[in-house]
Image (spheres, rainbow, N blue to C red):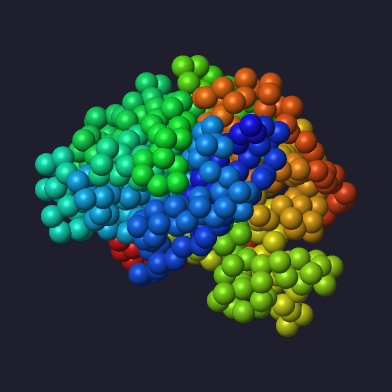
Amino acid sequence: MTQYVLAVDQGTTSTRAIVFDHAGTIVAVGQKEHQQIFPRAGWVEHDAKEISANTRDVVNQALAKANLDTGDLVAVGITNQRETAVVWDRKTGEPVYNAIVWQDTRTQSIVEELGALGGGADRYKAKVGLPLATYFSGPKIRWILDNVDGARERAENGDLLFGNTDTWTLWNLTGGPDGGVHATDVTNASRTMLMDLDTLSWDADIAGEMGIPLSMLPEIRSSSEQYGTGGAGVLRGVPIAGILGDQQAATFGQVCYEIGTAKNTYGTGNFMLLNTGEEKVASKNGLLTTVCYKIGDAKPVYALEGSIAITGALVQWLRDNLKIIGSASEIEALAGSVEDNGGAYFVPAFSGLYAPYWRADARGALVGLTRFVDRGHLARAVLEATAFQTREVLDAMNADSGVALKELKVDGGMVANELLMQFQADMLDVPVVRPKVAETTALGAAYAAGLAVGYWDGLDDLRKNWAEDKRWTPNLDAAERERVYRNWKKAVTKSFDWVDDDVS
C-alpha cells in the first residue's frame, strides 16, 4: 500500500495541509485563509480558535481530494508562522487573548524598558542570537500578562500555557485539554528570545526579567521526533513527528544541508537563511543567529537569518488598500508595462524595518515622485523593493560569513513572478534558482516528520528529491546596478524617525 506524509503549514494569512509522496511530490492541498485583525495602528492579531478550526478543515480537504484516510499516512509534520504568540488556559483550551502576530509593534515600550536595564538592543543577543525587538515572542507574552485582566495571576498559578502557533497546533491536534502535548521544537524556541542557543533550554534569568513564569513554556524538543499522536478526529493515531518554524522548514525543504548554502522565501515577508553548520555565528551586520534544524539526537545546525517584514504584503496592500490591481497576479504585467521604476522607490516599513536596520521608528515611504510616475512605475517600485531589501540582507550575510554566495535558492508565492526573479538576479549579481516543488516550507516539515518514522532513510534521500525548475542569471550592467541600489539606500533613510509617540 502506498503511504504518504501530511504537512500542516500554519502561515500568516492562511493554513494549509499538503500531502506528499516519497518523491516529495504534492499529492493534494487543502487551504483556508483566516482573518487579519488590526485593532490599532501597528497592532496585528489572529483568532487562534479560528486557526485551530481551519487546521481541521484543511486536513479534511486534503485527504478528501486525494481519497485518503488516516491509514494512508505515516506521519504528520507541522510548520508555522514563527514568533506569533498564543496564551491559553490549559484546562479549557480557551485563548486569553487573540494571537499577537510577529509583525505587531505594540511591545516597543517593553523592549525599550528591557534594553534600559543595560546593553540596549544587544542585552540578550550573546545568549539568544536576537536583538531586543518587537518581532519576537517573549515581549508579546509579557504584554498579554500585563494587559489582560487576571492573566498574570492565572499564569503564576500554573493555569496558562504559551506557544507559538506550532505549539498551539500540536496541543490541539494531540487532544487539547484532554492530554494535548505541550511542546515546541528548537527552531521555534529560538525565536522567543527566551532560549539559550548553546544549551537549547529556556533561560530562567531572561524569563524572569520579562516576567514570564517558566511553567507557561512548552518543552523544547528536536525538529524530527515523535511528539505524540493525533487525538480525536481525522488524524487519530497518526504520529506527529516533525516541527520546524516556517523559514527553517523552507531551508530544510530546499536541502540546504551544507555549510554556506542559502535560500530565500518570498511570502508575506522575506526570509533568507544561510546554513553555518554546528557553529553559531554571531552577526555584526544586523542579522539573526538562529537554530536551522536539529534531527533527533544529532547536534543542532545553526543559521544566519535576514528577516524582512514586508514584501508580498506590499503587493496585497497595493491590491486591497489602493485598488491599483485587482489580484496579486496582475502586478507582473503592470510592472512590465514600463521599462523601469521612473525614479520612484517604495520603502515598505509598515512594521518598522527589520534586517539589517532594526528600526522600529521607521514607517513606509514612497519617494522620488514626479508627474511622470504612473501605476506601472508604482507596481515596479513595489516589486523592486523586495529585491533591494534582499540585496541588503545578502550583503550583510557575505560580510558576516566571509563567504560570497554563489547562487540563491528561492521559494514562496512570489517566485512565480519572472520579472521580479530576473531583477533579483540582477541586483544580487548571482544566479537565482527555483525548484520544481516550490512549496518547500510544507515539504521541509514533511521531510522532518518522515525522517523521524523512517519513511526517508536520511538526508541523501532528500537531496535526490530536489530538482531545478528554472534559473535566472544576472544581465544588468554593473554601473546601473549600483546606481539604482544607491538610490534605494538613500530612499531607506527617508523612512527613519517617523514614530515619535508611544506605540504600546
Q: Residue at x 44, y 52 (%)?
A: 56
Judging depth in this view, the residue of 154 and 308 nearest the camera is 154
Judging depth in this view, the residue of 350 and 250 nearest the camera is 250
Q: How many marks?
A: 0
Q: Quadrant of residue 48?
A: bottom left
Q: Residue at x 19, y 46 (%)?
A: 91
Left or right relative to 318: residue 77:
left
Judging depth in this view, the residue of 383 and 54 nearest the camera is 54
Task: Kindly give the residue lying farthest to the top in the view shown.
Answer: 298
Q: In the rendered view of the protein, which quadrant contains the C terminus? A: bottom left
Q: In the rendered view of the protein, which quadrant contains the N terminus? A: top right
Q: Position of residue 284 (x, y in %)?
A: 52, 34
Q: Position of residue 354 (x, y in %)?
A: 51, 50
In this view of the protein, can residue 493 be seen by the observer?
no
Q: Residue at x 57, y 62 (%)?
A: 313
Q: Position of residue 460 (x, y in %)?
A: 69, 21
Task: Kindly give the residue lying farthest to the bottom in the view shown.
Answer: 371
Q: Residue at x 27, y 54 (%)?
A: 95
In this view of the protein, can residue 380 be seen by the observer?
yes
Q: Quadrant of residue 465?
A: top right
Judging depth in this view, the residue of 234 and 151 nearest the camera is 234
Q: Position of residue 282 (x, y in %)?
A: 50, 29
Left or right relative to 446: residue 186:
left
Q: Quadrant of residue 319?
A: bottom right
